[in-house]
Image: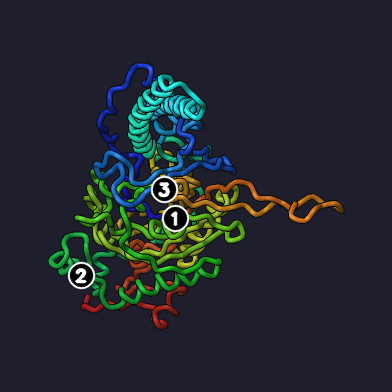
Amino acid sequence: MLTCGRYLSSAAATTPSFPPLRTLTFSLLRYHPIRFLSFSSAAATTAVEPETISGGGGGGAGGGATRPQWKAAIDFKWIRDNRDVVATNIRNRNSAANLDVVLQLYDQYLALQKEVERLRAERNAVANKMKEKLDPSLRQALVDEGKNLKESLIALEEDLVQLTDKLQLEAQSIPNTTHPDVPVGDEESSVTRKEVGSQRSFSFPIKDHLQLGKDLDLFDFDAASEVSGSKFYYLKNEAVLLEMALVNWGIAEVSKKGFTPLITPEIVRSSVVERCGFQPRAQNTQVYSIDNSDQCLIGTAEIPVGGIHMNSILADSDLPLKYVAYSHCFRTEAGAAGAATRGLYRVHQFSKVEMFIFCRPEESDKYHEELITIEENLYASLGLHFKTLDMATGDLGAPAYRKYDIEAWMPGLDRYGEISSASNCTDYQSRRLGIRFRPAPLEPPPSTNSKKGKGGSSGPTQFVHTLNATAVAVPRLIISILENFQQEDGTVVIPEPLRPFMGGLGVLTPKTKL
């Protein structure tokens, strides 16, 4: 996912407040484990089969709700057993997650669950005694005892539900684990993985994309500002052809790699945004939410593509599932200001082509390399100068286990600008979206005495790993093309791979006299 105008991740969310549980006796305050929720080490290649609880749409921690509308399969035991590792990861990623509160609630849950199980056992024992032949007085005593146990159990079970909701909401803010090779620190600590090409030398005064757009009559920001507001724009003339060319070229090239093309919905349920690791209704969010509904405008096709297999079990033979999706994207760009955001660089609406992969856990590192290689080959074929960065922990959103960004040289802006990113989210999103796969049956050992029906068997279902990467972020590539391939006479040369998608047009010519 291209992270320009990032969403506010769930890891950065403000800790929600909750109403207190009813007052319990001291003996009931030794609370207990959530065996049905789970959160694994990202390095693990297998997952324990959890008893996931299905949830509906909408709400979530970011909307002020006091109970979750969906449940993530979080492995609280792993978090507790690896407390120091999780705490360091939260700190390295500048997350606002409160691990102490999560572990405190988990301990309380464990004790309360244990107390609930004890009362259930007592209730069953009383019920079994009632089946015996008893004196009337003894039977009445058992009836009274059973009634008291039932009332106490109902109260405790209600408390258990509330405590489970508190634990779930707090734990949803814990970010994914981090690849051990990711550099620790803020964005400036990111490490260059690869550099392609070199900065072009110009023998004439260069223009930025805003001036080039004016001379070539490609944009109209003024009219768009009147019609829609700031950070909107009209594309005109050859810029329209250039956007269409970039989209069609990107989809065509990526489809050759075995990706299925998609055009996605551009309005999704808030719960799907949350499950992908973002908070649509948090303060300073980048998400446009629709009033009086549980829906949002998407900021990236990662979200509707991630949700396409929500709450499903995939066949092992279907993996990997690879998609290349086209969509418009909408971002509030809250807090974005200054020269670095001028023109097309940060806008509220843009077109993007996004790659997305569902795969087996042991293969996600391999497919992460595949995605970044596809991106690098795409931009190298356009003749752009760029560098690939292994992004530091402080720049990772909550879902990302590892993220590579590609920054292209933009001479008119006199700096590098991000044009894409590729993230391995391991099982962080799939545990929230409920996407698993069933491993293929194991082959039976060779034997002449094998009985019919005694062949190999498959293990428990596992959570898939998800990955996303930007193939084409249209505005950023338009900036890169205009500024890098401008000529002294005011024309702009179109990169060779795009020309077939522009009806053979190879040069953009000024519409005004220079």
What's the distance in space between the residues labelled 3 and 1, CA to CA? 11 Å
Among numbered discs 2 and 1, the one appearing first in the sequence: 2
Mark 1, residue position: 310
Which percent across, then down, holds residue 430? 47, 49
Looking at the image, residue 227 lies above or below residue 61: below
Q: Amino acid at mark 1?
A: Met
Quick one: SS at disc 3? Answer: loop
Classify mark 2: residues with Cα within 10 Å, few (<14), some (14-19) or many (20+).
Answer: some
Q: Residue furthest bottom?
A: 503
Mark 3, residue position: 54
Q: Residue furthest left?
A: 226
Mark 2, residue position: 220
Residue at x 25% of width, y 45% of height: 63
Which percent across, then down, holds residue 494? 39, 73
Find residue 409 and report its image quarter: bottom left
Q: Nearer the viewer, residue 409 or 433?
A: 433
